[in-house]
Amino acid sequence: MKFLCPCVSFVVLVLLAANQAASGADQSEANTDKAATNSTQANASAASGGPQKTSFLSQHISFQTLDGSMRYLYADQAEHKVTSRTLQYKISTRLQVNLDRCGNSYFQARGETGTAYNLSWNSTGVGLNPPADRFNVKTFFYGQKIGSHFEAQVGGLEYDWGAGTEATYSDYDGFFEGYRLRYSMPANRWLPEKIDVTAGYLGDFAQLNVFSRLHRLADNNYWQVLAQKKLREHAEASVEYDWLEGIHYTREALHWQKLPLRVIDDMEAEVITRLSDDASFGGALTLTKSVDHLSHWKFGGLFVNMPQRIFMNGTGTVLINADMYGVGQHIGPIVRVSPIKDFEVTIIGFHRLDSTPGVRNRAYVGVRYQFSGLANRLLRART
């Protein structure tokens, strides 16, 4: 399969060259950030353009995310075997630089704290764990819109989770190197609004800096074909096929908001099936309920069932899902409070139900503030 990646590269380069003869100044999009990670990367160029008056800086530079977070984390593997009881902090930003006013050509990068592929938190030194001060540029890629419906990306990319989450796919902090071609269209009755074809290399989990991994653009062990559709005003679904180091997967997800039910009003359901080499099945279900009409308070729970070997290839790992629950069966409560705009308090706890090795109990209390709105307003104010 190694020869496929240069083939994809050639196709992308041909499309980019064809775009030089096309008119591309009429692009204008508006997108929302999914948990500050998923739909932000799926619409990488959304922050550019708009009817409002903008400065030169804001036309060419935008913060897609700029988060500052702190949490107190507890984790144990057995009774009287505490592995983490520490205060941690996180800084994460996605910066986009548009090469033209409309954002048809752009570079985007994600810089983040963290000490592992699936861990974007540094320890403050308060508690059991020693202090850490790591910060890395984890993704860096070039994006190019091609006409009205196509977009190509190449470099150190973000994953596309579709309507699903990190519970059944890569952790939101993850990365890979490769190529993506996206076809998007306005909402319609039958066809998906987004189709992605992605090829690349997934691995080098210990190499957090993207510039130490860009040579992997010549390698290929990962394919994803994904289609996503809005089913109704507050519901979306996605289906995908994945190929990871010769192992075949399918994954389906549904996210339905504002459900007309008394006990829940938001549901995220997702399943992943390993079709070959120790076939197995995993999934996750998240249910939440807003208890006030402004959705400042949300209560809910999450159940995750991910077999231990679902992402294993022999003794190696082909993908790492969310660090909060990992593999095995986990269940726990979720509380989210948003008293003011851009500020959130989160309380999450999980308990392992089966005998899968690893963390038995994990919980944290965290606060997060999203500074991107403020940063972009400051850019607009500059002349």
Image: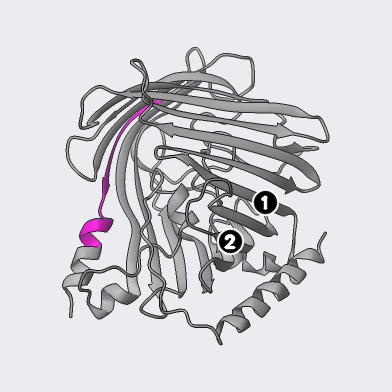
Q: Is residue 242 magenta?
A: no
The rendered magenta stretch, by its main secondary structure, is classed as strand
Q: Which quadrant of the view contains residue 94? A: bottom left
- The percent coordinates of residue 56 (x first, y second) are 26, 80
Position of the C terminus by quadrant: bottom left
Position of the N terminus by quadrant: bottom right
What residue appears at the point 53 percent right and 20 percent down from the top-left corner?
A: 330
Label 1 crowd (10 A; few <14 / some 14-19 / many >=20): some
- The percent coordinates of residue 88 (x first, y second) are 35, 39
- Residue 225's tag is 1
What residue appears at the point 44 percent right and 46 percent down from the top-left corner?
A: 120
- The percent coordinates of residue 284 (x first, y second) are 55, 27
- The percent coordinates of residue 345 (x first, y second) are 26, 33
Residue that carries the numbered disc 2 in the rendered image: 182
Is mark 1 in CB contact (under 8 Å) with mark 2? no
Query: Which label's residue is closer to the chain start, 1 or 2?
Result: 2
Q: Magenta span covers which residues?
A: 363-375
Q: 290 above or below 69?
A: above
Q: 186 above or below 269?
A: below
What residue appears at the point 33 percent right and 62 percent down from the top-left corner?
A: 63
| Residue 196 visible, this angle | yes
| Residue 118 visible, this angle | no
Q: What residue type is labelled 2?
A: Arg
Q: Which amino acid does label 1 sit on?
A: Val
Left or right, residue 347 beside residue 106: left
Element type at marker 1? strand
In this view, which residue lies farthest toward the bottom? 21
Measure the C-alpha gap from mark 1 to mark 2: 10 Å
